[in-house]
Image (cartoon, grey):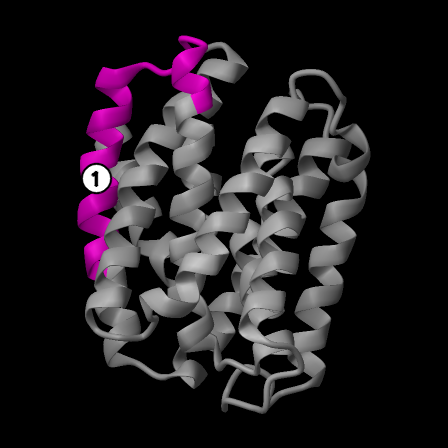
């Protein structure tokens, strides 16, 4: 079950993000402590995001020269966010983020050409990665859901990327924040390595397949899947808040 969830999550996550919607509930079915679920999930997710990032760099959808700035500041933001979540409640973010994601989906629906073709950048590369790296990296460490979607829309709006190119850079940044969080969880003894590695092998396979789909497709193909996943994450977060059947942790 864990392996199969990893394959599916790796495939979905490498294309549009949101793989955690598959892996986290799967691990929860095993009745693990919540923090152990999150730590183990980070191990599996690190395999998937690393695989996708490798292929996007290999096929030059992203380049190291620009990505290094995002990696640096994402690592800084994620470190702060992951440490802070142990001391400060993220309940406020849990309440407001679904509505931000819904607005993001409506933006993509209204502006039909957004993310289809590359446009002129509004900010420089370094400035953009400082802002997005610190901000979204912190968010990923502190809360998490929708991180890839926020990265993609940020790169589209600020650097004028199309969705295909933005997806490639997003996976590099996801790998960075996943790795930072994994190190912190592991240092606290909150990772079940056997389960995490089984899920990680599945995510490796799924991410490799998903990355090939992105490499061979265009932004118009990715766009509807992106919008759909944004809405799915929004519904999931709202369900966690308001359904009496779901225990929010």
Give 22 or 148, whichever is nearer the viewer: 148
| 199 falls in the magenta region | yes
Q: Is residue 147 left or right of residue 221?
A: right
Q: Is residue 132 left or right of residue 91?
A: left
**Percent position of residue 73, x then y:** 54, 49
SS label for mark 1: helix
| Residue under the image location 62 percent in, 67 percent down | 127
Q: Is residue 138 left or right of residue 187?
A: right
| Residue 87 in view, yes or no | yes
Position of the C terminus, as image quadrant, is top right
Give 124 or 3, whichever is nearer the viewer: 124
Up the image or down, 1 lies above or below 54; here it is above
**Percent position of residue 172, x then y:** 38, 55
Up the image or down, 115 lies above or below 57; here it is below
Magenta-tinted stretch: 184-209
| Residue under the image location 68 percent in, 38 percent down | 239
The majority secondary structure of the magenta stretch comes to helix
Disc 1 crowd rating (10 Å Cα; few below 14, some 14-19, many 20+) is: many
| Residue under the image location 57 percent in, 83 percent down | 160
Up the image or down, 42 lies above or below 63; here it is above
**Percent position of residue 245, x then y:** 66, 24
| 136 falls in the magenta region | no
Give 188 or 52, whichever is nearer the viewer: 188
**Residue beneath label 1, please?**
202
């Amino acid at each position: 079950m864990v392996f199969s969830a990893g394959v599916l999550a790796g495939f979905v996550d490498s294309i549009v993000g949101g793989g955690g919607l598959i892996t986290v509930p799967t691990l929860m079915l095993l009745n693990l402590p919540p923090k152990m679920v999150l730590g183990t999930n980070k191990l599996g997710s690190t395999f998937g995001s690393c695989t996708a990032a490798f292929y996007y760099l290999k096929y030059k959808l992203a380049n190291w020269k620009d990505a290094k700035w995002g990696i640096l500041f994402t690592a800084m933001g994620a470190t702060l966010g992951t440490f802070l979540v142990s001391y400060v409640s993220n309940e406020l973010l849990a309440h407001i983020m679904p509505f931000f994601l819904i607005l993001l989906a409506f933006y993509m629906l209204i502006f039909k050409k957004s993310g289809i073709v590359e446009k002129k950048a509004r900010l420089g590369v370094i400035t953009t990665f400082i802002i997005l790296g610190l901000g979204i990296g912190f968010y990923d460490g502190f809360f998490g859901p929708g991180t890839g979607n926020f990265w993609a829309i940020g790169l589209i709006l600020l650097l004028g990327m199309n969705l295909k190119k933005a997806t490639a850079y997003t996976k590099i940044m996801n790998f960075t924040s996943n790795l930072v969080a994994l190190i912190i969880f592991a240092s606290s003894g909150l990772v079940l390595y056997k389960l995490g590695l089984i899920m990680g092998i599945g995510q490796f396979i799924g991410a490799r397949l998903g990355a090939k789909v992105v490499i061979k497709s265009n932004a118009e193909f990715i766009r509807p899947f992106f919008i759909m996943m944004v809405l799915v994450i929004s519904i999931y977060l709202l369900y966690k808040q308001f359904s009496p059947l779901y225990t929010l942790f």
